[in-house]
Each structure stands twice: as structure tokens, then as C-alpha cells.
Image (cartoon, rainbow, N blue to C red):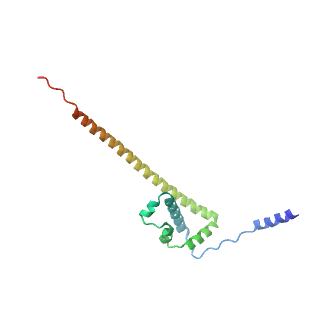
């Protein structure tokens, strides 16, 4: 009997619709929120892999997004909480963010590959130039055969 009571209580709580999170007054608009999330992820990746880039450009990663989008941490937290309460909407937003991140990654990889190819070609050209110089120097060292008179 006790197990049945616990089961019914749990069932009643699980069936109750949770109170929806109210829309904050200063909710960050969907498009702007996508840009904020994109920048947050880019900054996070940069902080973990290339801190010197942020330092070279005098970027304070903690305040960059707040300054760029004229928002504060409370507004961001409330907006994230609101959008997270609507999983389908948040999923669509993150699909767009992930698409932008993937496109940016592809662009970076193409640029990296092009730089690597350029360096490889420079090394190859340098080696060829050195070979030509050496061949020229070796020709100068070989005495020409004496002419018979």
C-alpha cells in the first residue's frame, strides 16, 4: 500500500505541467542572442587555444561580449534561462550557432592549409635555389681541360 501511495504521489508530480519561465523584460532578441552565443563560443575556443591572440588585441574576454552587445551578465543569464526553458527554440538557435562555427572552422582550416602549402613551396624553392648555387660553384671549381696547341 505504501509503495502504491509513493507511486501515485510521484505520478501526480510528474504529470503536473511545470510553471513556465516568464519572459524577462530585457530579453535579448533571438537574432542578437545567436550572435552573443556565437561570440561566447569563439572567445571560449580562443581562450583555450590561443590566449596570446586576445592579449595582442587587448581583448578582455570577460567583458568583450557585454560591451559589444550593450548587455550585462544578469540580462544574459536571464535570457539564457528563458530560452533554455523552450528547448525547441534553443535547439534551433544552437543549430545556427553550430553552423556558423562549422563554417568559420572550415575557413580557418582552408587558410591554414594554404599557408602550409605556401611554406612547403617556399622550402622546396629554397632547396632548389641552393642546389643551383651549389651546382654553379661546383662548375667553377672544375678546371677546364687545357687546349692542345
> For the view shown, which residue lies furthest in the bottom direction?
25
Indicate left or right for 129 with 97 as reference. left
Residue 76 percent location from the top left of the image: 56, 70
Q: Residue at x 54, y 64 (%)?
A: 37
Indicate left or right for 128 with 56 as reference. left
Indicate left or right for 22 with 49 as reference. right
Residue 88 percent location from the top left of the image: 63, 63
Q: Is residue 53 above or below residue 119?
A: below
> For the view shown, which residue lies furthest in the left direction?
149
Q: Quadrant of residue 125?
A: top left
Viewer-proximal residue, 149 or 114?
149
Viewer-proximal residue, 69 or 122?
122
Viewer-proximal residue, 95 or 46?
46
Q: Residue at x 45, y 66 (%)?
A: 59
Residue 30 percent location from the top left of the image: 56, 68
> For the view shown, which residue lies furthest in the right direction?
1
Q: Residue at x 57, y 73 (%)?
A: 74
Indicate left or right for 8 with 73 as reference. right
How many badges with numbers are in the image? 0
Q: Is residue 139 above or below residue 53?
A: above
Viewer-proximal residue, 73 or 12?
73
Q: Is residue 127 above or below residue 37?
A: above
| Image quadrant occupied by the N terminus | bottom right
Q: Quadrant of residue 87?
A: bottom right
Residue 32 percent location from the top left of the image: 52, 68
| Image quadrant occupied by the C terminus | top left
Amino acid at each position: 500500500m505504501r509503495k502504491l501511495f509513493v507511486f501515485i504521489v510521484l505520478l501526480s508530480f510528474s504529470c503536473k505541467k511545470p510553471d513556465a519561465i516568464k519572459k524577462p523584460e530585457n530579453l535579448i532578441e533571438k537574432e542578437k542572442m545567436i550572435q552573443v552565443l556565437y561570440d561566447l563560443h569563439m572567445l571560449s575556443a580562443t581562450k583555450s587555444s590561443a590566449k596570446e591572440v586576445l592579449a595582442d588585441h587587448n581583448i578582455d574576454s570577460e567583458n568583450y561580449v557585454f560591451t559589444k552587445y550593450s548587455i550585462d551578465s544578469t540580462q544574459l543569464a536571464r535570457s539564457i534561462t528563458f530560452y533554455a526553458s523552450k528547448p525547441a527554440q534553443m535547439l534551433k538557435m544552437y543549430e545556427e550557432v553550430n553552423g556558423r562555427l562549422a563554417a568559420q572552422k572550415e575557413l580557418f582550416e582552408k587558410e591554414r592549409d594554404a599557408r602550409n602549402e605556401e611554406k612547403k613551396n617556399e622550402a622546396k624553392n629554397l632547396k632548389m635555389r641552393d642546389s643551383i648555387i651549389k651546382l654553379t660553384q661546383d662548375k667553377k671549381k672544375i678546371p677546364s681541360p687545357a687546349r692542345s696547341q
